[in-house]
Image (cartoon, rainbow, N blue to C red):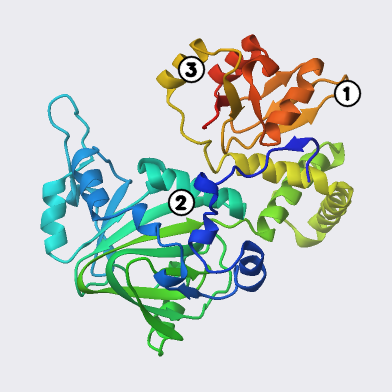
């Protein structure tokens, strides 16, 4: 792991694990027996039973009619195709002259005609899902997004396809009949969508599904990336959430290794040298020595990379895939101004803080926000905060505490 002290995953709301609300196994069993391997169907009776609080049909109506959503936070699918934005958006009217706001009237017409409404990016627009997806991402160590699919009775929103990310499907209302088939492209990368293997997917869809089942309210399906699937609403409007887990893979490790190696080998003047003048184009025999020189330099550079350097690069990349927990600017300023010695403070959840020591005893706090310099005599305080600590403001120092609060790093601890 990278040098320095790193914050742990924040404590789940109410002390409950997000993953534990989705599967009937403990985290270790899920990771070792099911993660990235095979589908898991879990019935509502085997779960804590509070998933339906996350989202519902009232949530859909509020988002599409009162929140002023714009594409691409919503899309519409019908007969296996995704409709153009203009088919369900219009101008916002006086005082909101935005051309692509979602039109509830157009959606009503499309929905009654059999179209599926897809609400995208709910991990950014719906409060309960903001909190839940952040906690799930912290527990899994992989970024998580949330979409909702609202399908009229007896309709299929999307034809057979596979996803390039793992998914948890949460049935929120109504019922859907699912058909699941093994991958034609196991463990596809993010740049390998199902459309790259359309013919194979269509051929596979003609065979009997490996699994066929109906999900009702509160049921959950875990589906690893690559598994082919489709679903049809039964007996009424069906709403389900899809939590997409954008998994980190060994290919990401390879990408960082090569990127670091290229930067290192480019310091060699021989690698930066121009190729010979070639009026007839590249010649295989003439260019072979150049290929061998560069290959040797690349292999040498790869061999000199320390694993910690790759981990640091991946960590930096991972920070940009998620946001810290939401913070109200006005409330935060008010809390900083009213700070007293006995106010309890804690590190902002999901800020992904890491303390990087310097040679002189000072350090830098690295996080999803800007780097924050830490003086030597404050290092112990920051170590305590990063270890999921709760400190009184006078233990931090009122001036420093206010500075950290206004930087968005510290928040008032919940009771």
Question: How many residues crowd around disc 1 within 10 Å: few (fewer than 14), some, or many (20 or more)?
Answer: few
Of residues 129 and 248, the one nearer the viewer is 129
The answer to whether residue 275 shows anywhere in this view is no
Q: How many angstroms separate mark 3 from mark 2 (CA)?
A: 30 Å
Residue appearing at x 45%, y 75% in the figure? 228
Q: Are marks 3 and 1 in contact (CB under 8 Å)?
A: no
Label 3: element kind: helix
Of residues 128 and 304, the one nearer the viewer is 128
Residue appearing at x 88%, y 23% in the figure? 359
The answer to whether residue 354 shows anywhere in this view is yes
Question: Any mark on residue 335, and which?
Answer: 3
Where does the image place residue 151, in percent across and percent down from the top left? Answer: 24, 65
Label 1: element kind: loop
Residue 386 appears left or right of 42: right
The residue beneath circle 2 is 145
Q: How many angstroms separate mark 1 from mark 2 (CA)?
A: 39 Å
Q: Are marks 3 and 2 in contact (CB under 8 Å)?
A: no
User: Looking at the picture, does residue 220 appear above or below residue 283?
Assistant: below
Residue mark closest to the camera, 3 vs 1: 3
Where does the image place residue 342, in percent across and percent down from the top left? Answer: 60, 17
Label 2: element kind: strand
Residue reaching furthest to the bottom = 208
Residue 212 appears left or right of 70: right
Q: Quadrant of residue 79?
A: bottom left
| Among the two numbered marks 3 and 2 on one chain, the one whose residue lies closer to the N terminus | 2
Question: How many residues crowd around disc 2 within 10 Å: few (fewer than 14), some, or many (20 or more)?
Answer: many
Question: How many residues crowd around disc 3 within 10 Å: few (fewer than 14), some, or many (20 or more)?
Answer: some
Residue mark closest to the camera, 3 vs 2: 3
The residue beneath circle 1 is 359
| Among the two numbered marks 1 and 2 on one chain, the one whose residue lies closer to the N terminus | 2
User: Looking at the picture, does residue 271 appear above or below residue 344?
Assistant: below
Residue appearing at x 40%, y 90% in the figure? 208
């Amino acid at each position: 792991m990278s040098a320095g002290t790193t914050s742990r995953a924040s404590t789940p709301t109410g002390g409950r694990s997000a993953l534990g609300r989705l599967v009937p196994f403990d985290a270790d069993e899920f990771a070792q027996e099911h993660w990235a391997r095979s589908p898991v169907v879990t019935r509502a009776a085997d779960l804590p039973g509070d998933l339906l609080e996350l989202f519902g049909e009232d949530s859909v109506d509020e988002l599409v009619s009162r929140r002023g959503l714009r594409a691409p936070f919503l899309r519409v699918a019908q007969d296996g195709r995704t409709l153009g934005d203009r088919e369900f958006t219009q101008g916002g009217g006086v005082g909101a002259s935005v051309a692509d706001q979602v039109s509830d009237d157009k959606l009503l017409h499309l929905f009654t005609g059999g179209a599926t409404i897809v609400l995208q990016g709910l991990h950014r627009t719906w409060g309960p899902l903001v909190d839940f997806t952040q906690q799930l991402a912290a527990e899994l160590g992989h970024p998580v997004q949330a979409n909702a699919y609202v399908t009229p009775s007896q309709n299929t929103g999307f034809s057979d396809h596979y996803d390039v990310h793992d998914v948890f499907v949460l049935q929120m209302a109504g019922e859907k009949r699912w058909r699941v088939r093994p991958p034609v492209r196991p463990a596809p990368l993010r740049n390998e969508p199902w459309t790259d293997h359309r013919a194979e997917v269509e051929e596979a869809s003609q065979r009997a599904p490996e699994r066929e089942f109906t999900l009702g309210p509160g049921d959950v399906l875990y589906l690893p990336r690559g598994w082919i699937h489709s679903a049809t609403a039964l007996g009424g409007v069906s709403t389900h959430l899809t939590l997409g887990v954008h998994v980190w893979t060994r290919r990401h490790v390879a990408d960082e290794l090569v990127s670091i190696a290229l930067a290192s080998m480019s310091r060699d003047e021989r690698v930066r040298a121009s190729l010979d003048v070639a009026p007839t184009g590249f010649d295989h025999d003439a260019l072979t020595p150049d290929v061998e020189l560069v290959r040797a330099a690349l292999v040498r550079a790869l061999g000199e990379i320390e694993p910690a350097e790759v981990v640091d690069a991946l960590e930096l990349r991972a920070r940009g895939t998620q946001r810290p927990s939401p913070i109200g600017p006005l409330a935060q300023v008010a809390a900083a101004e009213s700070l007293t010695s006995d106010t309890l403070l804690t590190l902002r959840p999901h800020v992904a803080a890491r303390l990087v020591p310097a040679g002189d005893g000072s350090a830098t706090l690295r996080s999803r926000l800007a780097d924050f310099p830490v003086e030597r005599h404050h290092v112990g305080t920051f170590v305590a905060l990063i270890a999921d600590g709760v400190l009184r403001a006078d233990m931090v120092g009122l001036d420093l505490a206010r500075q950290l609060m206004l930087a968005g790093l510290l928040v008032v601890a919940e009771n």
